[in-house]
Image (spheres, rainbow, N blue to C red):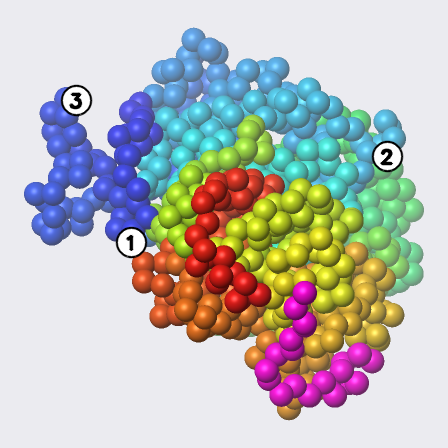
């Protein structure tokens, strides 16, 4: 099998421009020679148009294959019911698809190479052969017995109630994911191929792939629920899994609830913000935007219709109609596990018969139970519970020739299930927690029928179709089935009432409900789901080669930083060199988050900060200002020891040039009567939001919610922002949100105005700045960066300008430093590099400025 990942080693170019990287040839004309790699002679010849569509590599725990041992040989065929096989209908025509996953059977190590070669050549499948011990600890130990129950809201509160976290099974999970990553690396062309990973078995696989190829195109779809943060945070490896999912370009969920829980976990545990962008939800993660996709999966319409068109299906349906003639059929089709709520459904059916004597002998519940996907005490307990309920109800209400509940233990063929769907009056799905559950969708299509089936059964083809669905409100398909009867499966009384309502429901209502469901299911099939995800993945990856990327971190904490082509880390050597060759310097420094770490409780400056600022201010060529949103009293108190330091408080509303200067207010004619309106509103939200507070400044009012619950605080901040914008619509103020704040301040007051005024003042004094350093960390500092870029005429000719943000993130600044410690190291470098000889003219200028 040819590996193409090695070609990435040849690719040393920086694709930060709009051009795409060279595409690798599909054919090699001479052994060992790549004939058309980056061949400029083919430019414009349309050679690329002959290449196939970029491949899709679909990675799942199981390959979509059936395996049968025959005469000491393995025979393989497609598993037409496998979702990852059905989704190929949504990809562009002619696109090549590769599947990476494990087989459902154990292959002898001596046969593995031969089997792998056959599967790759005949099916485009790359098998991952996990040793039996590793497979057992990975799948049964961590996935099914620990992670799967946790994601379905079951906590291992005691040794008898679930399996607790074990480091050995987690290490097996990591090892198995690494095996999958190695297999993907064998076949991927990282510059072209798209990788789509499926489900919770492979949640840390994105980290392994992103670590090896920074620009790999990665999508992930979770087919199970994602639990609320209260449940998820109990996971000891919670951060590793979250960061792995954030190494994708697109993460998909069935419902908004699952996506909301994931975003809440990212906010609470990693401090990440998210926002909606033209209909898409995006998370900013180290310069990359991770898109969130919300779209429930669909079913393969053609597969069901083809099964229904078979003569054998019509025969089975005729037999079932004869067997249950004169009876109303309720149907349940569920996996045998603890979350499907089968015993609750059976108990509700028993209550229906108890409360309604006329239904005894006339109503039957057929319960099909698929074979369990795992084994253990929990499965045995569920089976015992079901058996007890069935025996009790059948003994109490059964009679000769009539069993109220008919249990069919799997495996049951898909054709048999379709036959039961077609003859059942109502399907009941009572799972207490389930990711999606496609049973109601399949039931709806089966009830619609086909012309061939209708003809075989002697039915009128154009007649109206009808169906009824009772569905748990705790499963993923519930929001999309607007015509279903939604129930709380824990409430057995209400479930029995729902079954009774089906018995008395009019035919017209059943037809209307069926029509609504069929219209949705037919238009949102598996091809629509796959096509939508694929298109969004392409969109999410469209700017990969417009940014510079490199990896940081170790192990499962590794991630990729992606920055614009002109955004680079500030080199201390470079800025020191420019500093030493300049004669008139302007240094503008934000305080919180820039010189002071944001997590410090004591916000007063350290002796180190005071010493560095004094050293910079002692150079007469320097004009140094701290530009902060804080009030003047706090700044004056904190920087009492800095004689020559300029201060700009409240985002530039109040300014002073040095300690001995007077505070000067903004030249704007500002009316502060709006405070009488704003303060009561903020007080109302403060009383309603535990942990919030109000900061009163001379020119502004600020509502802080950093100590409040992250989600509730953000929610209240948005409400407060909308409230204030409406009541202050006619006032000359600006209402804006920042880092865990909502601030109201006069129009025309910003840090950008401070920059313009200082640059203008220095030029008027005959000393236009030829060196400008501007450092900040939050949104208000972007005004400074923007103003610095517009001050070209006010600066000396050939001036060196350094606008620097703190943190690797999108910014109007051209430079960045990682944190406040790097800022202080840079400022120290400047202060110690000050030239020892200072001219008299420079000294005179310093006195004039002060």
Residue occupied by mark 3:
32
Do labels 2 and 3 touch, CB within 8 Å?
no
Q: Secondary structure at mark 1?
A: loop
Closer to the camera in the image, 168 or 148: 168
The mark nearer the N terminus, 2 or 1, is 1
Q: Farthest top residue?
A: 110
Is residue 35 something one can see in this rendering?
yes
Task: Residue 698 in the image: state x and y as whole percent.
Answer: 74, 76
Question: Position of 359 compared to 419: left or right?
Answer: right
Q: Is residue 715 above or below residue 127?
A: below
Q: Position of residue 153 (x, y in %)?
A: 76, 44
Query: How many other residues sit within 10 Å of disc 1, few (<14), some (14-19) or many (≥20)?
Result: few
Judging depth in this view, the residue of 739 and 27 nearest the camera is 739
Closer to the observer: label 3 or label 1? 1
| Of 199 and 315, the residue lying toward us | 199
Q: Which residue is mark 1?
A: 18
- Residue identified by numbered label 2: 157
Residue that appears at 76% across and 59% down: 637
Residue pictured at 43% horizontal, 8% vertical: 110
Q: Position of residue 232 (x, y in %)?
A: 73, 43
Label 3: few (<14), some or many (≥20) within 10 Å? few
Residue 381 lies, with reference to residue 390, above or below; the image says above
Measure the C-alpha gap from mark 2 to mark 3: 60 Å
Q: Residues within 10 Å of mark 2 (few under 14, many from 20)?
A: few
Q: Is residue 671 magenta?
A: yes
Residue at 37% in and 26% down: 186
Front: mark 2 or 3 = 3
């Amino acid at each position: 099998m040819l590996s193409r990942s090695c070609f990435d080693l040849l690719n040393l170019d920086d694709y930060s421009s709009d051009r795409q990287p060279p595409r690798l040839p599909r054919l090699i004309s001479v052994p060992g020679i790549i004939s058309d790699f980056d061949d400029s002679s083919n430019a414009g010849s349309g050679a690329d148009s002959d290449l196939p569509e970029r491949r899709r590599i679909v990675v799942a725990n199981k390959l979509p294959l059936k395996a049968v041992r025959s005469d000491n040989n393995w025979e393989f065929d497609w598993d037409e019911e496998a979702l990852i096989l059905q989704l190929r209908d949504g990809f562009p025509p002619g696109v090549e698809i590769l599947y990476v996953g494990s087989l459902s059977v154990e292959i002898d190590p001596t046969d593995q190479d031969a089997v792998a070669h056959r599967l790759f050549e005949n099916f485009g499948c790359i098998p991952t052969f996990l040793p039996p011990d590793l497979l057992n600890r990975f799948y049964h130990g961590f996935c099914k017995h620990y992670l799967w129950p946790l994601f379905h809201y079951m906590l291992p509160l005691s040794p008898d109630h679930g399996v607790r976290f074990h480091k050995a099974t987690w290490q097996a999970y990591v090892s198995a994911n690494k095996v999958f990553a190695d297999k993907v690396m064998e076949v991927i062309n990282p510059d072209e191929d798209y990788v789509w990973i499926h489900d919770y078995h492979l949640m840390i696989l994105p980290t392994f792939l992103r670590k090896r190829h920074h620009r790999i195109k990665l999508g992930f779809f979770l087919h199970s629920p994602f639990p609320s943060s209260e449940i998820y945070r109990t996971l000891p490896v919670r951060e590793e899994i979250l960061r792995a999912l954030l190494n994708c370009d697109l993460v998909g969920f069935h419902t908004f609830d699952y996506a909301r829980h994931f975003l809440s976990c990212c906010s609470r545990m990693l401090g990440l913000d998210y926002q909606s962008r033209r209909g898409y939800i995006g998370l900013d993660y180290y310069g990359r935007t991770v898109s969130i996709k919300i779209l429930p999966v669909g079913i393969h319409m053609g597969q069901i219709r083809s099964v229904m068109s078979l003569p054998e299906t019509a025969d089975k349906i005729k037999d079932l109609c004869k067997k249950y003639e004169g009876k109303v059929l309720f149907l349940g089709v569920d996996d045998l596990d603890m979350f499907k709520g089968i015993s609750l459904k059976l108990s509700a059916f028993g209550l229906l018969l108890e409360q309604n004597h006329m239904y005894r002998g006339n109503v039957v519940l057929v319960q099909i139970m698929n074979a369990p996907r795992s084994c253990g005490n929990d499965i045995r307990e569920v089976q015992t519970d079901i058996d007890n309920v069935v025996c009790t109800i059948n003994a109490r209400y059964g009679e000769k020739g009539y069993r109220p509940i008919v249990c069919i233990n799997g495996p049951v063929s898909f054709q048999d299930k379709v036959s039961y769907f077609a003859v059942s009056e109502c399907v009941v799905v009572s799972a207490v927690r389930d990711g999606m559950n496609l049973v109601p969708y399949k039931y709806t299509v089966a009830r619609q029928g086909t012309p061939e089936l209708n003809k075989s059964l002697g039915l009128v083809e154009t007649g109206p179709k009808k169906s009824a669905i009772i569905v748990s409100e705790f499963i993923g398909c519930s929001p999309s089935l607007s015509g279903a009867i939604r129930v709380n499966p824990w409430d057995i009384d209400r479930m029995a009432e729902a079954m009774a309502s089906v018995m008395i429901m009019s035919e017209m209502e059943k037809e209307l409900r069926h029509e609504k469901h069929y219209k949705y299911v037919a238009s949102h099939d598996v091809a629509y789901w796959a096509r939508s995800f694929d298109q969004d993945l392409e969109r999410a990856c469209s700017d990969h080669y417009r940014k510079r990327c490199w990896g940081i971190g170790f192990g499962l904490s590794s991630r990729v930083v992606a920055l614009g082509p002109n955004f680079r880390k500030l080199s201390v050597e470079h800025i020191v060199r420019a500093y030493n060759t300049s004669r008139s310097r302007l240094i503008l420094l934000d305080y919180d988050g820039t010189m002071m770490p944001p997590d410090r409780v004591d916000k007063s400056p350290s002796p180190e900060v005071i010493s560095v600022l004094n050293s910079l201010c002692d150079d007469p060529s320097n004009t140094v200002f701290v530009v902060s949103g804080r009030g003047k009293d706090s700044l004056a108190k904190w920087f009492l020891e800095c004689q020559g330091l300029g201060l700009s408080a409240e985002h530039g509303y109040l300014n002073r040039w040095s300690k001995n200067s007077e505070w000067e207010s903004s030249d704007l004619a500002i009316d502060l009567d709006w405070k009488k309106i704003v303060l009561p509103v903020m007080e109302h939200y403060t009383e309603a939001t535990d942990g919030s507070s109000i900061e009163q400044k001379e020119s502004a009012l600020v509502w802080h919610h950093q100590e409040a619950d992250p989600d509730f605080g953000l929610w209240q901040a948005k409400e407060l922002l909308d409230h204030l914008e409406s009541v202050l619509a006619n006032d000359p103020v600006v209402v804006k949100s920042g880092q865990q704040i909502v601030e109201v301040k006069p129009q025309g007051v910003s840090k950008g105005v401070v920059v313009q005024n200082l640059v203008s003042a220095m030029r008027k004094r005959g000393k236009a700045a030829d060196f400008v350093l501007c450092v900040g960390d939050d949104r208000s500092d972007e005004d400074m960066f923007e103003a610095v870029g517009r001050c070209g005429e006010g600066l000396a000719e050939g001036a060196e300008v350094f606008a620097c943000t703190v943190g690797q993130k999108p910014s109007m600044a051209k430079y960045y430093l990682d944190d406040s410690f790097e800022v202080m190291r840079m400022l120290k470098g400047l202060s110690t590099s000050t030239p020892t000889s200072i001219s008299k003219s420079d000294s005179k200028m310093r006195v004039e400025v002060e």
